[in-house]
Amino acid sequence: MSISVLGSGAFGTALAISLAGNGPVTLWARNAVKAQAMQDSRRNGTRLPGVALPDNLSVTADIAEACDSRVLLLAVPMQTLRRALQEHKDHLAGKTLVACCKGIELDTGLGPIAVIQEVLPQAAAALLTGPSFAADIARGLPTALTLACGEADRGKELQEQLTTANLRLYRTTDTIGAEIGGALKNVMAIACGAVIGAGLGDSARAALMTRGYAEMQRMALACGAKAETLAGLSGFGDLALTCSSDLSRNYRLGLSIGRGEEFDSSITVEGAATARAVAEQSRRMNLDMPVTITVTNLLDQRLTIGEAAAHLLKRPLKEE
Ligand SMILES: NC(=O)C1=CN([C@@H]2O[C@H](COP(=O)(O)OP(=O)(O)OC[C@H]3O[C@@H](n4cnc5c(N)ncnc54)[C@H](OP(=O)(O)O)[C@@H]3O)[C@@H](O)[C@H]2O)C=CC1
Ligand SMILES: O=C(CO)COP(=O)(O)O
């Protein structure tokens, strides 16, 4: 059965390359000129330079052609997912849609699966998430991911279909846990980058990752997720990767905040909008999310990194 990937950014292209090892794949780009350039040059020079596209990967800007497959991977940034779904609603109805984005929608506080279900109630929705830099996947380096789908049988089918030679998929029906883990690890990566950028040291980063993980769990459990999901690839796994590698754009944004440098605003950094969405949600739910709130304060320049660290250290002492 053929598979299509909608969204030809770094991640969509990398997933399409990996999946092409299983059979023909169609990669859809919204821009016809870019699609043709990729199809002709067999490269995605802007988003994933230096990697060749396999022969059985075809690139198109024709949404009808791309939606010929039953399973469609949605690899667009979280804050554009709703628009992309609405724009192509007619083509997407009745398909199995696997969101590959990580984040929480700013205007609604919803994760990717909930957004799909709201826009396309007839579609089957799933999420592919976990530790996976596009550059690694595209080069055929191995990793393991979480495939989350509320319908157990469909999840199993997708797990088998989307596992590739270098991507080992584990499955779960806990979609909320997978969504929240993948979204919040980006917020924690911004915090950790800021700590390292400001020279506060590796011990501070480890402390922040641990307390950030506690926050991820607090929010997830309050939303009905399972603690085990947060301990898995979509939570702990991706947190460990993203908070410790400058291949991460979220971590690099944090580094630039810590160093007092400018950051290119055209780069996709999911953690910024997600921090704001989760901060708002935590207020509504009366949940203590100090690291997330601190990240929003840093992003909006309400605190310097020194003030942020002092504020976190001076909070009332409590049990771990
Ligand atoms: N990069 C990575 O290593 C990983 C990324 N992810 C997740 O994947 C998601 C996408 O990230 P990534 O691929 O890196 O981002 P990129 O910035 O590389 O690419 C984003 C892509 O989305 C396209 N796009 C944006 N808005 C729309 C829209 N409304 N309709 C159709 N296409 C649209 C852009 O098109 P155009 O080129 O025309 O601007 C672009 O191709 C994010 O949620 C990210 O967290 C997950 C794991 C790893
Ligand atoms: O999600 C990722 C790795 O799993 C990619 O992280 P960035 O979006 O921070 O680059």
Image: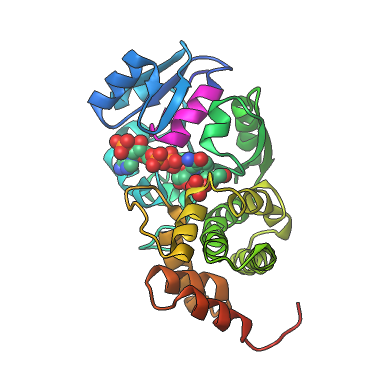
Residue 117's place in the image compared with 286, above or below, is: above
- The image shows residue 58 at horizontal and vertical percentages of 39, 16
Q: Report the residue that reaches farthest toward the bottom.
A: 316
- Residue 82 visible somewhere in the drawing: yes
Residue 40, how many percent across, how many down? Answer: 32, 13
The relative height of residue 206 versus residue 159 in the rendered view (above or below) is: below
Residue at the image position 28 percent from the left and 23 percent from the top: 62
Residue 169: which quarter of the image?
top right
Residue 199 x %, y %: 57, 65
Q: Nearer the viewer, residue 142 or 216?
A: 142
Q: Residue furthest top?
A: 55
Q: Is residue 14 left or right of residue 300?
A: right
In magenta, the rendered stretch is 5-18
Q: How many marks?
A: 0
Outermost residue on the left side: it is 33
What is the chief secondary structure element of the magenta stretch? helix
* Residue that appears at 52% across and 54% down: 251
Residue 13 x %, y %: 45, 29
Q: Residue at x 41, y 65 (%)?
A: 260
Q: Note whether residue 110 is visible.
A: no
At x 57%, y 82%, the residue is: 310
Q: Quick one: 161 or 237, which is closer to the camera?
A: 237
> Is 217 a magenta residue?
no
Quarter of the figure with residue 230: bottom right
Q: Is residue 18 above or below residue 113?
A: above
Is 14 contained in the magenta span? yes
Front-lying residue, 174 or 206 = 206
Q: For the view shown, which residue lies furthest in the right direction?
A: 319
**Left or right of 245 in this view: 12:** left
